Image: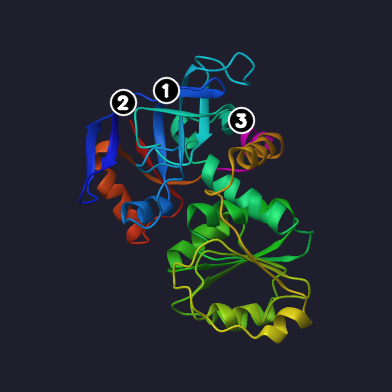
């Protein structure tokens, strides 16, 4: 088969590689599409290697057709599926543990389905498991609202009854995230985020930005608030008033999905299938695709994310 590997200069190269060998508890998939995530950009730059046991090239979520599967798996040869991976999705075929492979929601195309496993696992993991859920009327704050994770988190928080605040980089993006349910869209080029959060103390925050402003924002958390860090795109250094942490009983939580065990990921994905797949099938939750590119144009696809142009997901097709 072929895969979009990284050569010795860390440039993309469409190269012939050995076909994956399926273990007895794994599913073999012919890939139709693979979504692009910021983790892929980090991996290309040499900063986020695949976990042990996974291919060395990029790709955390795919969709496609089952070629082989265990007899007791929930999917069978010929089924249209999506899968969460530790790496290696930019290839013609992949294998994944059976529990990390899901049938696609009704009325979803394979391109749409490729955008579900990583983003929605991240959202469900952090809002439900790390934060312990959100109660109706609580305030939820998510950074980068026009990203794939941001759009998903906004929608999910609204289904839980939250008031949603998010950040965006333009007036156009602000209008889009409001259509997905954001109550307040903070254009960080024009608005004072710290002041907005003071006026709307968040109970739960999902932060992929960090940076020097994070400590000031943290002061605005509601009593018992949960601030979850999943990345530090604006930098890893900030100043935190520790009295705020203990006086307000705030929990500062670091969270990643990629490093979790297949068993943990299986549990998250099965929860998605149970709780969210019916909402996708009914059109109450959607996956928003900004653009799709053939796999040969992977550099152009990555460039969209690097320039922060995307509103939603970017997908590679095979």
Find the magenta span and give its range. 277-286
Compared to residue 206, the image places residue 77 above or below, namely: above
Q: Which residue is mark 1?
A: 21
Name the image quarter holding residue 48. Answer: bottom left
Compared to residue 236, the image places residue 316 above or below, namely: above
Q: Position of residue 246 (x, y in %)?
A: 76, 80
Compared to residue 132, the image places residue 56 above or below, namely: above
Q: Secondary structure at mark 1?
A: loop
Classed neighbour count for the residue bearing mark 1: other residues with Cα under 10 Å, few (<14), some (14–19), many (≥20): few
Residue 2 magenta? no
Classed neighbour count for the residue bearing mark 3: other residues with Cα under 10 Å, few (<14), some (14–19), many (≥20): many
Tell which circle, 2 or 3, labels the residue nearer the N-terminal end.
Answer: 2
Whether label 1 touches label 2, CB < 8 Å: yes
In this view, the residue in front, 48 or 121, is: 48
In this view, the residue in front, 254 or 204, is: 254
In this view, the residue in front, 117 or 293, is: 117
Which of label 2 and label 3 is nearer to you? 2
Q: Position of residue 63 (x, y in %)?
A: 46, 31
Classed neighbour count for the residue bearing mark 2: other residues with Cα under 10 Å, few (<14), some (14–19), many (≥20): few
Q: Which mark is residue 18?
A: 2
Looking at the image, which residue is at 58% across and 20% down?
A: 75
Looking at the image, which residue is at 51% across and 72% down?
A: 210
Tell which circle, 1 or 3, labels the residue nearer the N-terminal end.
Answer: 1
Q: Position of residue 144 (x, y in %)?
A: 50, 63
Compared to residue 74, the image places residue 267 above or below, namely: below
Looking at the image, which residue is at 48% across and 75% down?
A: 188
Q: CA distance from mark 1 to mark 2?
A: 9 Å
Q: CA distance from mark 2 to mark 3?
A: 24 Å
């Amino acid at each position: 088969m072929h895969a979009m590997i990284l050569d010795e200069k860390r440039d993309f190269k469409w190269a012939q590689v050995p076909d994956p060998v399926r273990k007895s508890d794994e599913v073999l998939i012919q890939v139709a599409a693979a979504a692009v995530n910021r983790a892929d950009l980090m991996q290309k730059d040499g900063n986020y290697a695949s976990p042990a046991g996974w291919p060395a090239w990029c790709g955390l979520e795919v969709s496609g057709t089952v070629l082989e599967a265990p007899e007791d798996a929930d999917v069978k040869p010929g089924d249209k599926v999506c899968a969460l991976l530790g790496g290696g999705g930019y290839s013609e075929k992949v294998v994944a543990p059976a529990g990390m492979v899901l049938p696609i929601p009704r009325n979803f195309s394979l391109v749409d389905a490729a955008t579900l496993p990583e983003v929605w696992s991240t959202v469900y993991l952090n809002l439900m498991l790390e934060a312990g859920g959100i109660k109706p009327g609580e305030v939820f704050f998510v950074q980068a609202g026009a990203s794939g994770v941001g759009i998903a988190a906004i929608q999910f928080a609204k289904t839980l009854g939250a008031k949603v605040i998010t950040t965006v980089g333009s007036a156009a993006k602000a209008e889009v995230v409001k259509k997905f349910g954001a109550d307040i869209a903070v254009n960080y080029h024009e608005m004072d985020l710290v002041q907005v959060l003071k006026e709307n103390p968040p109970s739960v925050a999902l932060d992929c930005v960090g940076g020097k402003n994070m400590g000031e924002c943290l002061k605005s958390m509601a009593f018992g608030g949960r601030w979850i860090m999943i990345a530090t795109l604006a930098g890893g250094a900030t100043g935190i008033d520790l009295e705020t942490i203990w006086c307000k009983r705030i929990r500062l939580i670091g969270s990643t999905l990629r490093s979790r065990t297949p068993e943990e990921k299986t549990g998250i994905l099965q929860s998605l299938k149970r709780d969210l797949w019916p909402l996708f099938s009914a059109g109450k939750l959607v996956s928003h695709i900004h653009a799709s590119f053939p796999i040969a144009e992977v550099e152009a696809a990555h460039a969209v994310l690097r320039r922060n142009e995307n509103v939603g997901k970017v997908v590679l097709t095979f």
